[in-house]
Image (tube, helix red, strand yellow):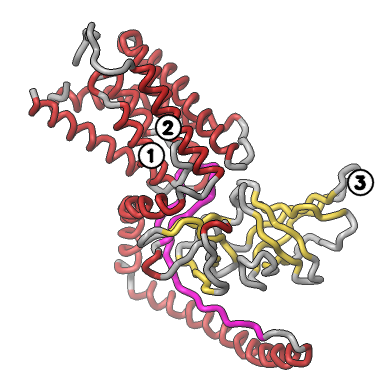
Amino acid sequence: MVLIKAHNRWVITATFGLALFLTVFPVAATLRWFRPEFITLLVIYWVLVMPQQFSLLHLWLLGCAVDLLVGSVLGQHSLALMVVTYICMLSYQRVRSYALWQQSAFVFLIIGLQQLVGNWVHSLSGSTPPSLVFLMPALVSALVWPFLSLYLDRLRLRLHVS
Amino acid sequence: MQAIKPLFTEGPSIASRVISLGAAALLLIILNVYTDALTPVRSVLGSLASPFYLLTDLPSRLLGWGQENVLSRDQLQEDNDALRAELLIHKRKQQQMASLAAENVRLRQLLNSAEMIKDRVLVAELVGVSPDPLTHRVVINKGRRHDVYLGQPLLDAEGLMGQVVEVNEFTSQVLLITDATHALPVQISRNGVRAVAEGIGDLYHLTLRHVSNTVDVRVGDLLVSSGLGQRFPEGYPVAEVTSVVNDPGQPFARVVARPKAYLNRSRHVLLVFGGKATDAGEL
């Protein structure tokens, strides 16, 4: 049992490492709005799959790591991830049985909420709030969700992560 | 997969844990936005982020290496010719510069004003850009080890780019002049009118703040740094005025300028060691 858990941890950490890499991968300035929120997508996925095995403190620290990496206000992503995780932990039994497109809609809502938190912190530090374009990452993430979740399901089966 | 919710959970409930951690995050945010208490923590922990940026920079670096090393002879020769021609043009300009600089020194002596100080520069390379579309920040590959300091100005070949806002061990973060939270004092090189150029979160536009309708500013005017904020050295090109709208109904004219620096294209940049290091409190 302990071995299985250790194995799980490695796989999950590896996926998050890759997500961090993709989060800061440089793209053209105009394309930056179209980057999916990889970290949040992964958090949603793993919390839906194994809600009891996740330590909130670890996710909180992950949020801080993202903030340091991205250079945003320290605590911004932690706060957003707490909101996201809480909703996922309350509703995982229902969301698991949704069809993929319904899950996508769920993802859109959740990530939209996360962007809202980000926006709020941004306006605290004095930048002007943008137009509705701030929902673009949520939309792209929702479109990416079916592919990501199917792929991770297969990966999970192959690597025996459960 | 644990499908069944455990009946007897250990420790505090999820809600209370979320609330306490959320409150901790809020506290961090407030500390970060309203005080400088976290600046040293950030600059130490931020060093851990440098390898990530160097890693993400690897593909473009490899591509660049390939482009530089896998070249045909003809292409190299062509490049060489073009560079030689460019060098010649610059050398001619330099000749003029020498006499102009000498003249300038004489005139300054006549006016009894301080001599222009030659700025020392350090060539740095861009290794990353902020993934957040709302913040205009870049990461450069020079840090505390190379004596980079907070508030240090950054230039590219065309003009002013921004200032260092976070110094890590081997990298530093630079806030670009177009960021919505950035403003810098400038003057019009044609007539010396002073203004403040503000970023609006758009890579191609700056606006001039509080320019009254009667001020002499025209499309095409070059804005140079005025050195008044004690942050940027004097006389570096910042932007070119692209539109001036005088609306009698508004108290101020609306002046938009386009940054001279290639904020989203320059890879090789210059750090200027002009002024003195400022402590974090002034930022």
Relative to B117, say whether A66 is above or below: above
* Label 1 chain ID: A
Task: Check disc 1 and give the amino acid type.
Answer: Cys
Dots 3 and 2 on the same chain: yes
Residue bearing the label numbered 1: A64
**SS for dot 2:** helix
Give how far apart the Cα atoms at labels 3 and 1 are.
49 Å
The residue range painted magenta reads B115-140
Residue B232 spot, x, y in % from top left = 61, 67
A151 inside magenta stretch: no
Residue B248 circle label: 3
Residue depicted at 63% across the width and 63% down the height: B260
Subunit that carries the residue with mark 2:
B
Task: Assess disc 1: are there few (<14), some (14-19) or many (≥20) residues with their C-alpha within 10 Å of its C-alpha.
Answer: many
Where disc 3 sits, the SS reads: loop
Residue B230 relative to residue B3: left or right = right
